[in-house]
Amino acid sequence: MTERRVLEFPDRAERENLATFLSRAVRLDPAAVVRLRRRGDRQVAAWVATGFETLAMRTVDAGLGVDDVTVGADVLLAGLPADGPVELGYSMDSAWRGALPPVEGFTHVDDVPARTLVDLAEQGARLAKEQGGHGPPVALLDQPVLTVSGAGAGVAVPMRVVFALTAMDFIPHAARPERIGSAEMVRVRATRTWLRLDARFGSVARRLGGGIPLLAN
């Protein structure tokens, strides 16, 4: 039986959910690719690179005709408004060069107020602007700006992960921090080799020690 290279959605809300995610990815990189990975029969994880050596992910309710495929984010985005199955277009698997973090094995370290992370991103943006140049300097991106401890573990969160989280608009009302409720949290999880931040609208992940490993997953 031939697998169909299509995405199928149970309702329009899930199409819009994925479209929002892809719009943000294309805003960061017009040539972005998206890696789609099936999770059971009813969910699909969509992954993109953010430009901060940090991956971003959103899970949507959908059916994927193949187990794992990488396609152009702009092509998929253009096909989402139409009704019916969404054709995925040409495979771009060779354009995805990094491994994905594991699905399981993460330890919940602690929860951090979302407002704290938005404030850190704003401070980092101001520092980058003061230092000039094209984009934030590497020293600023790699600087640990938050240490989170709990469950017998402790992890340092670098600025590049905070920038990735806010650049993808995963925190509600990030553009107007005064509207972020005190109960709005970002969950910090980690394995021995990966750091992951889970916000309301998506997750970001980075390999501990830096970079995305060039390994098959």
Image: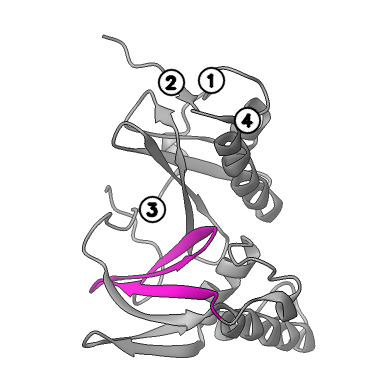
Work out whether residue 164 or residue 81 is closer to the camera in this orientation and state it. 81
Which structural element holds mark 4?
helix
* Residue 38 percent location from the top left of the image: 34, 36
Q: Distance from label 4 to label 1 (Cα)?
A: 9 Å
| Residue depicted at 42% across the width and 35% down the height | 93
Left or right of 147: which side holds 90? right
* Residue 42 percent location from the top left of the image: 36, 34
First in sequence, mark 4 or 2: give its number.
2
Main SS class of the magenta portion in the image: strand
Q: Which residue is mark 4?
A: 75
How packed mark 1 is, by other alpha carbons closer than 10 Å (few <14, some 14-19, many 20 or more), is some
First in sequence, mark 1 or 3: give its number.
1
Q: Amino acid at mark 1?
A: Glu
Contact, mark 3 vs mark 4 (Cβ under 8 Å): no
Work out whether residue 117 or residue 178 is closer to the camera in this orientation and state it. 178
First in sequence, mark 3 or 4: give its number.
4
Left or right of 166: which side holds 206? left
Magenta residue check for 216: no
Q: Which residue is mark 3?
A: 98
Q: Amino acid at mark 4?
A: Val
| Residue depicted at 47% across the width and 61% down the height | 203
Q: Which residue is mark 2?
A: 5
| Residue depicted at 55% across the width and 37% down the height | 14
* Residue 138 percent location from the top left of the image: 57, 79
Q: Which residue is mark 1?
A: 87
